[in-house]
Amino acid sequence: MIPSDEVRTWIDLARDDRVGEVFRLIFEESAETVRRERPLCLASGRCCHFEAHGHRLYVTGLEAAWFIDQLAERTNRLTIPMVEEARRRGDCPMLEDGLCTVHDIRPFGCRSYFCDPRAGWQEAAYERWHARVRALHEELDVPYAYGEWRDMLTRILEFDGEP
């Protein structure tokens, strides 16, 4: 279990402009990487159907908190029951009618995952982006934790709003 004080720190810093700036820069780099590499996307849903395709999405605590903070600024709503239902289905809670409802703020792992067998650049790109997020944790003296997407979302949602 991740300590409550760590979760509170992530939630508080998710609103920090420095965090948003680093994430926006990674988003820009990821978009440029995808434009340059031109991976084939078959819209197979493998990226969103974790259990069916034998993979997991991992995020840092700060990334999960930032995502939920960004989501709160939209009409999208995420609840613990929605995350638990997604877990039962084996997919992402942000998937609706086969489509991602948060494509522009999706996690870094989503931005680098393509089922295209030619996409050998994916791991190096993700590691580069993840290293930046890890460095951000260090720069801001933020506790670092890395966990499965739905677990991290649940932990933030459980804690968000507590004093």
Image (cartoon, rainbow, N blue to C red):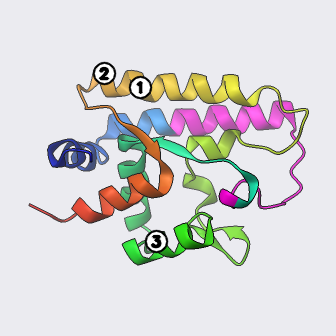
Mark 1 element type: helix
Query: Identity of the amino acid at label 1?
Result: Arg
Mark 3 element type: helix
Judge from the rendering whether residue 156 lies leftward or rightward of residue 31; answer left or right: left
In the displayed structure, 109 sits above or below 124; it is: below
Magenta span of residues: 24-51
Q: Position of residue 2 (x, y in %)?
A: 26, 45
Between 61 and 29, the one lying in front of the other is 61
| Cα–Cα gap, marks 2 and 3 | 31 Å
In the displayed structure, 128 sits above or below 147; it is: above
Instruction: Kindly identify the residue that appears in the image at 73 percent across and 31 percent down.
Output: 122
Disc on res. 138: 2
Q: Which residue is mark 3?
A: 84
The reply to whether the C-beta atoms of the residues labelled 2 and 3 are less than 8 Å apart is no
Q: Position of residue 148 (x, y in %)?
A: 48, 48
Q: Is residue 75 visible?
A: no
Q: Position of residue 64 (x, y in %)?
A: 41, 50
Between discs 2 and 3, the one toward the N terminus = 3
The reply to whether the C-beta atoms of the residues labelled 2 and 1 are less than 8 Å apart is yes
Q: Which residue is mark 1?
A: 134
| Cα–Cα gap, marks 2 and 1 | 6 Å
Label 1: how many residues lie within 10 Å, few (<14), some (14-19) or many (20+)? some
Q: Quadrant of residue 129?
A: top right
Query: Identity of the amino acid at label 2?
Result: Glu
Query: Identity of the amino acid at label 3?
Result: Glu
Between discs 1 and 3, the one toward the N terminus = 3
Instruction: Kindly identify the residue that appears in the image at 31 percent across and 63 percent down.
Output: 157
Judge from the rendering whether residue 60 lies leftward or rightward of residue 99; answer left or right: left
Instruction: Kindly identify the residue that appears in the image at 55 percent across and 72 percent down.
Output: 88
Label 3: how many residues lie within 10 Å, few (<14), some (14-19) or many (20+)? some
